Amino acid sequence: MQGTDPHGLIEAAREAARHTYSPYSRFPVGAALLCGDGTVITGANVENRSFGLTNCAERSALFAAVSQGKRDFRAIAVFCPQSEVPVSPCGACRQALSELCPNDMPVYYAGRDGRAATTTIGELLPQDSLHDLMKGRA
Ligand code: THU
């Protein structure tokens, strides 16, 4: 997982945030997921008037990627253009990402100035004993 250049991925996440549907929070978010074959699959947050149905940008990107046949993930970037500070994935997204991504996969997250903080899936969801038991399953 070392050596992944975050810059291009963060820019892809910035671009993805333009596709947000967030009339309720007015808080756009974009995500960009780097796949093992070099492709980048993006997602934006998609809200709903039944608030609990909101899908975060990270899960939008992850579910789009899996739906397109991707299973090998190398890094994800999250961009929040309205935020002064970097915003890391929410608890639901941490669980969803952990299901399909390696523990040491980098997660980059940036606010409007584009300066990214870096962490990993394993740091976002520690003590996830079930993580490796599921590896290799369809
Ligand atoms: N949101 C994301 O898409 N990703 C995050 O990491 C944080 C929160 C969305 C959900 C909701 O549409 C809006 O941001 C405000 O919480």
Image (tube, rainbow, N blue to C red):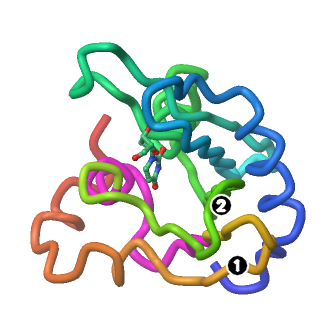
Is 100 covered by the magenta stretch? yes
Q: Does residue 97 sit above or below 130 in this rendering?
A: above
Q: Quadrant of residue 127?
A: bottom left
Which residue was labeled with disc 2? 77
Extent of the magenta region: 94-108
Q: In this view, does 67 lie to the left or right of 17?
A: left
Q: What residue type is labelled 2?
A: Ala
Q: Quadrant of the C terminus?
A: top left
Residue 51, x across and y down, in percent:
26, 25
Q: In this view, does 4 lie to the left or right of 52?
A: right
Which residue was labeled with disc 1? 116
**In 3D space, how far apart are the residues under numbered discs 1 and 2 (Cα atoms)?**
9 Å
Residue visible at 60% across and 45% down?
Answer: 29
Residue visible at 24% across and 15% down?
Answer: 50
Disc on the earlier residue, 1 or 2 = 2
Residue 117, x across and y down, in percent:
62, 83
* Closest to the observer, 1 or 18: 18
* Closest to the observer, 74 or 125: 125
Q: Which amino acid does label 1 sit on?
A: Ala
Answer few, some or many: residues within 10 Å of disc 1's Cα (few below 14, many 20 plus, some between 14 and 19): many
Q: Quadrant of the N terminus?
A: bottom right
Q: Are marks 1 and 2 in contact (CB under 8 Å)?
A: yes
Considering the numbered disc 1 on the image, is that residue within a helix, a strand or a loop? strand
Residue 115, x across and y down, in percent:
77, 80
- Ligand 1 within 8 Å of the CB at mark 2: no
* Closest to the observer, 4 or 45: 45
Residue visible at 80% across and 71% down?
Answer: 114
- Ligand 1 within 8 Å of the CB at mark 1: no
